[in-house]
Image (spheres, rainbow, N blue to C red):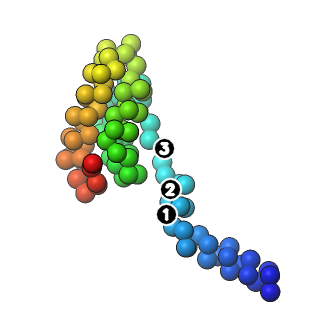
Amino acid sequence: MLPALSLVIALAGPAALPGIIATAQAEPVMFEPDWPNHQEQAEQTICLALAQGWPRTQIVDVAEHANDIDQTGLSVPEAARLADTWIDEAHNTLCPTLALD
């Protein structure tokens, strides 16, 4: 009886927890150090983050910390403002169906 129960749990377990399985397989969201020089790529990254449920503040925080001032010439506050602006642009043009806080 115990082996049969183990088999049922092994087969039914993943079906009962699809959100956990999907989250574990989510793509990592990373901005390149020169992301402000590549708007289209940055906006695709933003949509990926929105698809995973990231709030605006988290996206801005990750983007501003990824910014390399030597490559972009943007300070941390400037990078944060640009990321915030591009979140709206990405949402409006590339991923309007995703939730935006």
Rendered residue at 53%/54% (across/down): 25
Q: In the image, residue 76 lies at what x, y percent?
A: 34, 20
Rendered residue at 61%/77% (across/down): 12
Front disc: 1 or 3: 1
Quarter occupied by the N terminus: bottom right
Horizontally, residue 93 falls left or right of residue 72, namely left
Q: How crowded is mark 1: few (under 14 residues within 10 Å), some or many (20 or more)?
A: few
The quarter of the displayed image where residue 10 is located: bottom right
Badges 1 and 2: C-beta atoms under 8 Å apart?
yes
Query: Identity of the amino acid at label 2?
Result: Thr
Numbered mark located on residue 23 in the image: 2
Front disc: 2 or 3: 2
Q: In the image, residue 82 lies at what x, y percent?
A: 25, 28
Numbered mark located on residue 28 in the image: 3
Q: Which of 7 and 80 is in front in this view?
A: 80
Query: Identity of the amino acid at label 3?
Result: Pro
Estimate the spatial distance between the alpha carbons at disc 1 and disc 3, rounded to whole Å.
16 Å
Residue that label 1 marks: 19
Query: Identity of the amino acid at label 1?
Result: Gly
